[in-house]
Image (tube, helix red, strand yellow):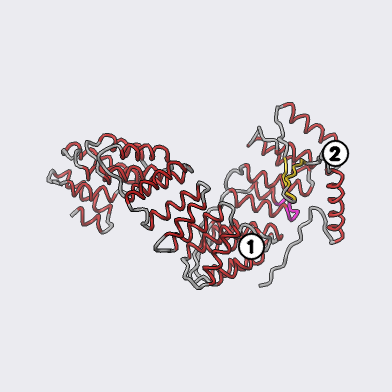
Amino acid sequence: MVSGFLRNGKFDEGFAYFKQMRKSGICWFDQATLTTILSACDRVKFYHVVKMMHGLVFSNGYEKEISVGNSLITSYFRCGCLSSGRQVFDEMFERNVITWTAMISILVQNELYEESLELFNQMRSGPVCPNSLTYLSSLMACSGLQALTGGRQIHSLLWKLGIQSEVCIESSLMDMYSKCGQVNDAWKIFESAQDLDEVLMTVILMGLAQNGFKEEAKRFFMKLFESGIEIDPNMLSAVLGVFSEDTSLSLEESAKVFSRMSQRNSISWNSMIAAFARHGDGCRALQLYEEMRSDGIAPTDITFLSLLHACSHVGLVEKGMELLKSMTDVYGIIPRAEHYACVVDMLGRAGLLNEAKTFIEGLPVKADMLVWQALLGACSIRGDPEIGKYAANQLILETPESPVPYVSMANIYSSRGKWKERARTIKRMKEIGVSKEIGISWIEIEKEVHSFVVQDRMHPQAELMYGILEELLELMLEEGYVPGNVTPTECQT
């Protein structure tokens, strides 16, 4: 009866019936009943049920049953209590391959990579042989640690066992080599794979892109795309997310790929919206948002973060405020500090510093460092010492050891010619022991790397550098550039 309730997802009824039977004294159960009940305990709220079942295991003499022990380990993990699961593992009289694999996998999922590899080596020294899933988890641990030597050792073991050609193993090997910076080894596995699927193609593309071979990844992807091969939506989303971050795959090419996707999920929509927002095309980002909604895909908090960023950079204040309101009113999404910081930045860029200050004071939560930095940054752009000082004081309370509020205020005072206030700010900064790290920039020109700092007059080519900067500034001013100005953009609908 209990098993029937649980198998049909009626957990409350099942547990209630089990408790009733226990109270009546007519409850009899075997290890199958125990494992069935434990398998249903997959959420934190069932932790006390798992503890109760654990007690029944001992009181009824099932502590030596491997299947019961395995179920306890898994249930404790699903309820968020890894330490209790590990204790069960350590106290088991006997363990099979399922026991070892479950524990190793759980450690990997919790990013305890070193501990999982220690357990893997301990398993190999005993009578129980690892299976494909055990090796898979161990490879994931090597990827997480970027442990190339350990990964190669596991690869050798797989080759000796003749199971390296299993698709899940191949993709994990490729991922491990890519994470360790050995893209050539990942490519060799890809080329020798008997069955190329979307997973393998995604792994090699991401490996190429994340190791700096974005042009090679672009050519490979476009070759696949133009050949008409059906590509998994998740693969396309992942690729768009990587390529849209820079110009190796232009926005137009990304949009072309996106338009030909047979299925689009929230990840692919968010990737394209973020790409246009990042590249300053806020109107196109907003247009995609409307298309996303028309397509029946609900926006996420990531969507709104990109949209607010877009509105900030094109000066669409009213639209930005409308989007922030719709987050909670329409979609029930609670804004994070990043969203509020974007709104403050948007108001500040539009010159609405008083409105930005009022917005912060009316927030439903206490403003954090991100929000105050956004306001201070806006004051730096606009050269507003009054609100800037207010924001700086709040930021000092949040991060007393940070040089940012002092340096920003010194720059604001400089822009207004208030040299005494600037000197006092720098003096105060030194008195309390806050130091500013010197920012160094590097640039490679004709295979020669040059480094320089702000207002660097000691560089051997300083005269030439400042001459070029002055020429560039003159050209910008001729084109109508006004420092600090943000002009709202009208989007065509």
Q: On screen, 57 above or below 332?
A: above
**Quarter-of-image position of residue 196:** bottom left
x, y (%) of residue 81?
Answer: 35, 40
Element at badge 2?
A: loop
Tell me the residue at 65%/47% (across/down).
360
Q: Using the rendered image of the protein, determine whether residue 284 is visible from the camera's viewpoint.
A: yes
Relative placement, left or right, of 277 versus 35 is: right
Give the magenta part as a residue range: 349-355
Residue 412 vs residue 129, the one in the foreground: 129
**Does residue 29 belong to the magenta stretch?**
no
Tag nearer the camera, 2 or 1: 1
Looking at the image, residue 307 sits to the left or right of residue 474; the answer is left
Image mark for residue 418: 2
- Location of residue 66 in the rendering, given as x and y in whole percent from the top left corner: 22, 43
Q: Nearer the viewer, residue 244 or 175?
A: 175
Tag 1, which secondary structure? Answer: helix
Q: Amino acid at mark 1?
A: Phe
Q: Nearer the viewer, residue 144 or 5?
A: 144
Label annotation for residue 276: 1
Say few, some or many: other residues with alpha carbon within 10 Å of mark 2 (under 14 / 14 to 19 / 20 or more): some
